Image (cartoon, helix red, strand yellow):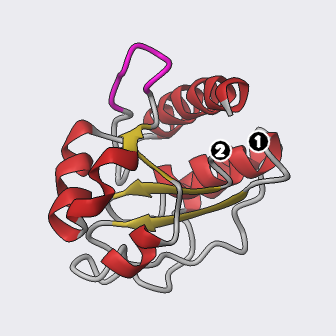
Amino acid sequence: MFNKILVVCVGNICRSPTGEYLLKTLLPNKIIDSAGVATEKSRLTGKPADVMAREVAADNGINLETHQARQLTSEICRGYDLILVMEAGHKEAVTKLAPEARSKTMLFGQWVGQQDIPDPYRQSREAFEHAYGLIDKAAREWAKKL
């Protein structure tokens, strides 16, 4: 049922690429991509994943080297069966952009207490490791459900 999955955060350089590539590893038969709700506003479109996000992911066997940030659009939303957002507020951003996507938008942390996954951008390595741990735990729960 959910064969095309989109992972969304703000800039598409820390959390959503990490979630995307983790899910790709866990669900190799699914199409999984990511995008950001404010990638253009932040001037991050086309940029690679954050250096610290790449390092923490690599330490855990996940390679983010080929990632390029992209801006979420209503057209992109239409192309996916399930949209997973990192924070409850991102649901509103997705809905504002693509009202028809509301019913297929859920929290990435849905199965780990419906928790938001905090943005580690411009924070310490520990913040990135904490976010990675939450994303990893949530991705494993999603893999069980999907």
Point out the image quarter for the C terminus. top right
What is the CA distance from the residue labelled 1 to the residue labelled 2? 5 Å
SS for tag 2?
helix
Give the percent coordinates (x, y) of residue 132.
57, 35
Front position in the image: 3 or 131? 3
For residue 97, side relative to residue 78 (left or right) = left
Q: How many marks?
A: 2
Mark 1 is on which residue type?
Asp
Left or right: 11 as drawn, with respect to 31: left
Out of 68 and 87, give the one closest to the viewer.
Answer: 87
Q: Residue at x 27, y 61 (%)?
A: 100
Residue at 41% over, 84% down: 45
Circle 1 sits on which residue?
Answer: 59
Question: Along the line of sight, which residue is nearer the eye, 38 or 60?
Answer: 38
- Can the viewer see residue 5 in this picture? yes
Q: Which residues are magenta?
A: 110-116
Q: Which residue is mark 2?
A: 56
Furthest residue to the top?
113
Q: Is residue 53 above or below residue 126?
A: below
Q: Main secondary structure of the magenta part?
A: loop
Image quadrant assignment for residue 115:
top left
**Magenta highlight on residue 92:** no
Q: Residues within 10 Å of mark 1 (few under 14, many from 20)?
A: few
Q: Are marks 1 and 2 in contact (CB under 8 Å)?
A: yes
Q: Secondary structure at mark 1?
A: helix
